[in-house]
Amino acid sequence: MNGEDFSVNEDIVRYVSAASAGDTDAMAKLFSKTLKSSYYLAYRLSGDHDEAVEITKNAYTRVFCTLPRLKKPEAFEIFMRQNIASVYKEGRKFTFGDALADIPEGQLEFLSEDVYEEDAKRSAAAVAVSDLSDELRSALVLHYYSGMPVTPLARYFNVSESTVNSVLSKAKEVIFDKCGSSEPGIQKPGTLPVLNRIFKLEAENIPVNPADVREIFAYVFEKYNTFKQVENIKNGAGSPKSPEFFSPEVPKGQGNEESEPEGIDFDTFIDQPSRKPAVAKAGFGIDSIKNFIANFNLKRDYRKLIIAAAALLILILIIAGIAKAAGKNKNETPDVSVTDTVAEKVASKWIPGGFEDCAEITYLNENMACFKSVTTQKYGIMDYNGNILIQPRYDTEFRPCGTGRDYSNMGKYHVVIKIDNTDYYVSYSNGKAEIAGVHQSHSFEDDTFPSNAKYDERDRYFEGLAAAQKNGKWGYVDSEGKKVIPYQYEAVNVTDGGLNTLNKYNSDYCRPVTGGLIAVKRDGVMGIINLKNETVAQFEYSMIMPGKDGVFIAKKDGTWGVITTGNAVSTFTGVKYLLDASDDEISTEAGQGDKYYIVIGSGGINIRADADKDAQKIGELSTGSRVKGQGTKTAANGNAWLRIEYNGRYGYIAMNLVREDTSSN
């Protein structure tokens, strides 16, 4: 990718050379210097924190265990990114069925400079990337952050280059629209594309939980230690002698002979579930760690040894970072590693207002909510950033499909709306929603829980956790059914009847995990907790919607507003409707409003975006179709046009091609 910055860091080269020879201190420094970039790539690809941690674990393990094969130490960061991409890809099935053929490669720069310079636009671009499908997001991130050109991308996805170009084109179009970019100028020589710079800025500032840092490092160190132990035995070298390489002695068999080591399949070996080690407590200094190591039996205390080794190396990183920050080398910019970060207690802030035109807001699914407008007295759909996805123009509320909730995330949990006694389904893709067509009847797909399940009921999985019920209370379990959050909360989506009645056929029971935070209900009120079951937002809200980027739409003391958590910043400025500029010219005095009409045009008629035969065509109606009028508009040539609702927007059809349906008016 032209313009990508792969400048060589001399420290990296030195550390790679030492680490290749088994220097674990050098490995620790490599880990410290590259963790943020590696974790960010894993998070951007997967869109999920827990999965990103697992990807990062396995990728570092592979890299450290194969480091001697890396012939060019200066290529370490590229090597790291390749392994992140490789681990992410495993177990995934990408589909490119709707990709267009014969699409040429487009220009790298597709965003205007103000998208990078303005916080709101930069944030909107980042959110838009997160909302892309796996295929679009993966291609875009690998192209713009990892610098993977089209040809290697085609090999990565096992598709043609024209398919990759098509996917990139679609992704760029979505980002362009979402962030309000104007047409970009000519990219200046030596400058990186705007999206690449946004990714780099995010990677530099992404917070990495110290607990995750310790967990990843301890996991990698343990796997590497075991791998090297087996390799040494295979090579007849016995146990390593270097004091920097903490490895246990090989266990003995029943007699005096050593037991035969098992062969290790590398890919299987590194993907074994990690056993989370204990973390050294604060104040556990280098001397105490050395004494700790010296005072126990290697054969008996292998697990403790691994923990101590990890703690020692991480402590080395912290001291090194502090020394630099204090000005040990005053000619260099202080380089404070991710392990220097002190965990801060997540705070929250309540910001009331902005939803004055929302008479009601009700949960639909993890992507969107139904709302009723005070102005129109009709229903529409918004997302959890407060963006209007479908304008409030409908007489009936949107609701979850009556047979659409399943446990397996197979895509059948969806939203429907009844129009003229016919149900239509609402599609959602890449942050956009529309009324897509008549809802077809289908069956409910249930899920069989494991025979050893310790819960009575379970919701869907989000970020690796699902709400589960036991003895009438709800908590959260992981993919293996192990309890992560205690069973002490109440179902959220419960009313006396109607939209969110507690019913496993038409509603999620509890809120999804979003960004490691969950809106939960206790004693009839809602608050927000983290995955340690610590309270982030106090239990004083009558309603909290699912979060988006640390921001939650909520209701308190009868007023809707937003809760911001941690360092999250709300870009919400109030619900805004995309009203037609020509609304003032619409007339309903002649009685066309709320009347129904039958299409009489031969062979059907076109629906236009405005009252003009040359306006953009947005759809078609077949002869005999029945439509509801929203008023009339007179074109410049004097012809009358009927305004109708079509796929969440207004459209126009010529009045001379319809007749009033007097049978039902």
Image (cartoon, rainbow, N blue to C red):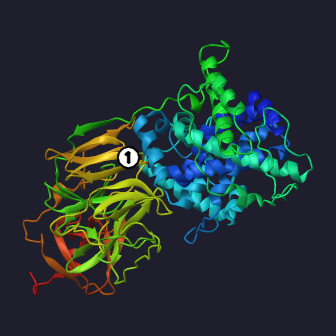
Relative side of 45 to 646, left or right: right
Q: Secondary structure at mark 1?
A: loop
Residue type at the position of mark 1: Asn
From the top left corner, tell me how far across and down residue 571 is, in percent. Answer: 34, 40
Q: Kindly identify which residue carries mark 1.
A: 533
Q: Looking at the rendering, which quadrant does residue 68 occupy?
A: top right
Q: Looking at the rendering, which quadrant does residue 203 occupy?
A: top right
* Residue placed furthest toward the right: 236
Measured along the vertical axis of the image, is residue 76 above or below residue 289?
A: below
Q: Residue at x 47, y 75 (%)?
A: 451
Q: Nearer the viewer, residue 158 or 530?
A: 530
Q: Nearer the viewer, residue 69 or 599?
A: 69
Binning the other alpha carbons within 10 Å of mark 1 as few (below 14), some (14 to 19) or many (20 upward) gives some
Q: Residue at x 63, y 22 (%)?
A: 319
Q: Nearer the viewer, residue 656 or 67?
A: 67
Q: Residue at x 37, y 83 (%)?
A: 443
Relative side of 478 to 542, left or right: right
Q: Nearer the viewer, residue 367 or 105?
A: 367
Relative side of 128 to 65, left or right: left
Any part of residue 291 in sight: yes
